[in-house]
Amino acid sequence: MSNKKYQNKRQGSNSSNTTASLGAKVTALAAAVRDGSGLLNKPELKEELNVDGTFLDDLRSSLPSEQADRFAPWLDQFARFCKELNKKSALLDEGRKTVQETIESAEEEMKKNRQDLEDEIAKERDRLRQEEKNLQEQHDSLLTDREKLNAESEALKPRAEEISRREGELVDRELALEFKELEARNGFASLKNEALDGLKQEIKSLEADRDRLKLEVELQHEVMSGAQREKDAALVQREHELKVSQQRLDTKHRRLRQLQDELDDERKDIQKTLDELMVQERECFELERDRQNQAVNRAYEKVDALSRQLSDVKELQAVLGEREPQVLLDELEELRRTNSALRSSAVGSDLERLEGDNTFLRDHVAQLESQLRDLIPELEESKSELSRRRMGASDLKRLSDEKRTLEVNNQLLGARLNELSSQVNHLTEANQAKSAFPELSGMDSDDTYRIVPVIEDVPESLESFAEELQHRIAQVEEETKLYYPIEDIRALLGGLAMSQLHVFQGISGTGKTSLAKAFAKAMGGFCEDVAVQAGWRDRDDLLGHYNAFEKRFYEKDCLQGLYKAQTDAWKDRCNVILLDEMNLSRPEQYFAEFLSALEKNNPRERLITLSENGMDDAPRLFINKRRILVPRNVWFIGTANHDETTNELADKTYDRAHVMTLPRQEETFEIRAMERVRYSFSSLQKRFEKAINSHRKEVEELLENLKTSRLTTVLGEGFGLGWGNRFERQAKRFVPVMMAAGATKQDALDHLLATRVMRSGKVTGRYDIDLDQLGQVEDAVVELWRDLGGNSSAVKSMLQIEEDRRRKERSV
């Protein structure tokens, strides 16, 4: 009985505990249902799934005891499952929002890109229309010019056959140039139309991709599963494809701009050719007119001389009459006989009178003899001249006919000259509104000279940079590999820090020109190639000249290179002006102004005067509208061969320049592949200044040892040479940069001595120096190197001394 009561009590306690437990579970289950209904946006679920403890107690009491005991844990697990489901649903909702935001951002970006593309296409279409309009105007202008030239050709038909032939060649050449320009213009228009069609296809493709992406987004809204990650990857891939498409569009735009630049260059070449043809034609007409005038003047002079000679002959004939020279001689002999008879018969008081008469007659006879001797040659000459005159009557008539013909030709040439003068005046008036420097002013308005490209700094270590530059120079030319030893690259860097003027000398085929061009390309700059001619005398041959008649300056490549190096796109890059075969003429004449300008310590004072007065239409970068600056980022590199066709460079040029003698290169090395870069000029100068400051004390000690060495005494006493301020200034820049690039100070000093002191004409190659003096120099160099503690000898200097020694021994 007691056990039954205890069991009933226990069951009641368990029932109460279960009821309490079920109440807690009902609260948790209700909260899970409430949260789920809120997340699913279905509030009706909250009412439909609402449960309370009484319902669960009735449900539990209706179950068997074993199942009732399992119902409470199951309900607890179901509550936890609902809670986890709520958490997972919340995470999915956050992911959905993130994806939605990403998709909306992508759609906005696509809309923005599409709008940018549409704006760009509209601008391109407007620009193309404007270009077509300009090209049509130019076409009309060319047709007008052709009609004028045809009219002039009709007017010149009476001219001689040679002039007609030249005029025909000029018209044919102009027509060929016109056809060439029209073909280039048509090709450009077709390419632009193709590019526009390609852009339209690109836009259609992008719109199709956009629609497809919208469908994919709708599908993603419906399906929130594991495929979400694949869709994200697809979006990333599509973004990449859009970037690639944008790059393709940029490439097409660059290609269009390149085509435009090529067309502009070809148009400039055509205009330049037309100008040159007009100048040549005008010069030919002027030369022909001068030649005809000279022929007419010579004919007039000849006629006047013949007329004077004929009058002299007539006067002589009037004096002599019809008597022959023999008759005059007979009369003289008769007078002599009469004189002798009178002298023998003279008597008395008549003797003195006769003597006087005899003296008078003797003097008169002497005078007559003298006159006769003078008249006989003149008479003979007059007779022969008269004969020639009679025989040359036909020649005089021919000369008269030629004179009349020349006068007619002169009139025709004068009329043609007036026509050409009016045409030139018309062209001059048409060009007066343009700049006197058309090419330089064109750079001011050209966007390609305003856009600053991406430029990198030179590496901090000049030693590693020298090795890198060696490999860049070796592979800069696609078809040819250029192998220069590292010693030459180090000497080149030292020379760049020392002077803006360089001389590369050596036999033909050693790569002098290639090194200059390859250095400019490897550094990302330009190389303006100037071919020096044998007849150059002054700076006009190098820079160009001003034509006062056309009010235009004919800018040569060197002047254009100087100006180009100062534009925004090139002012911080390393550029070269190459004077190829610079010693075909004397640089001391055509390069004299540059030699003086480069000696000025202040770089802003290195100016070249192009005009005596300032010009209102001068290019933007001119100083005081009449001068151009020689910029620091330009190096003048001249190549020099030594043969019978060239001139020897003067000491004035050698002393101001960095000289390199390039031998024939036989050795090769494995080239490291490198991408093209553009190195800044300012960073290169910073590396030079850092090297100069780092090795300043060491270089000063080196120069002090040189000044106090026996070499200084030998050169001063035996050769009259000393160390000037220029040598010391150059050494303080050349030696430290060479050391920073990986060379020793002894190697750098040896290069300076070999190129500045031991070169031919200074110490070696002189006929007033004997072998003993040359031996003293050699001993002094060896002693200097021993004092400097170098492991090597002065190789370059000793080779020059040894070569001169062998020459002197052979001559002995």
Image (tube, grey):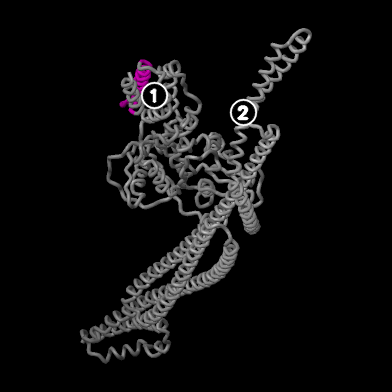
Q: Main secondary structure of the magenta part?
A: helix
Circle 2 sits on which residue? 326
For residue 751: magenta? no
Q: Please, what secondary structure does the residue beneath circle 2 have?
A: helix
Q: Position of residue 64 (x, y in %)?
A: 22, 90
Q: Quadrant of the C terminus?
A: top left
Disc number placed over residue 735 in the picture, else none: none
Is residue 370 shown above or below 606? above
Is residue 1 shown above or below 489? below
Determine if residue 432 is in view: no
Is residue 376 shown above or below 254? above
User: Which residue is at the front of the view, 293 or 148?
Assistant: 293
User: Which residue is at the front of the view, 748 or 319?
Assistant: 319
User: Which residue is at the front of the view, 79 or 138?
Assistant: 138
User: Which residue is at the front of the view, 68 or 266?
Assistant: 266
User: Along the horizontal axis of the image, is 357 left or right of 456?
Assistant: right
Circle 1 sits on which residue? 764
Amino acid type assigned to the residue bearing label 1 in the image: Thr
Determine if residue 170 is in view: yes
Is residue 341 shown above or below 593? above
Amino acid type assigned to the residue bearing label 2 in the image: Gln
For residue 774: magenta? yes
Q: Where does the magenta region start and end?
A: 772-795
- Give the distance between the C-alpha atoms of the residues marked 1 and 2, in whole angstroms: 82 Å
Judge the density around disc 2: few (<14), some (14-19), many (≥20) Cα neighbours within 10 Å.
Answer: few
Judge depth for marks 1 and 2 and give the one in front.
Answer: 2
Q: Position of residue 487 (x, y in %)?
A: 34, 36
Q: Are marks 1 and 2 in contact (CB under 8 Å)?
A: no
Judge the density around disc 1: few (<14), some (14-19), many (≥20) Cα neighbours within 10 Å.
Answer: some
Compare marks 1 and 2 and give the one earlier in the sequence: 2
The residue depicted at 49 percent of the width and 25 percent of the height is 724
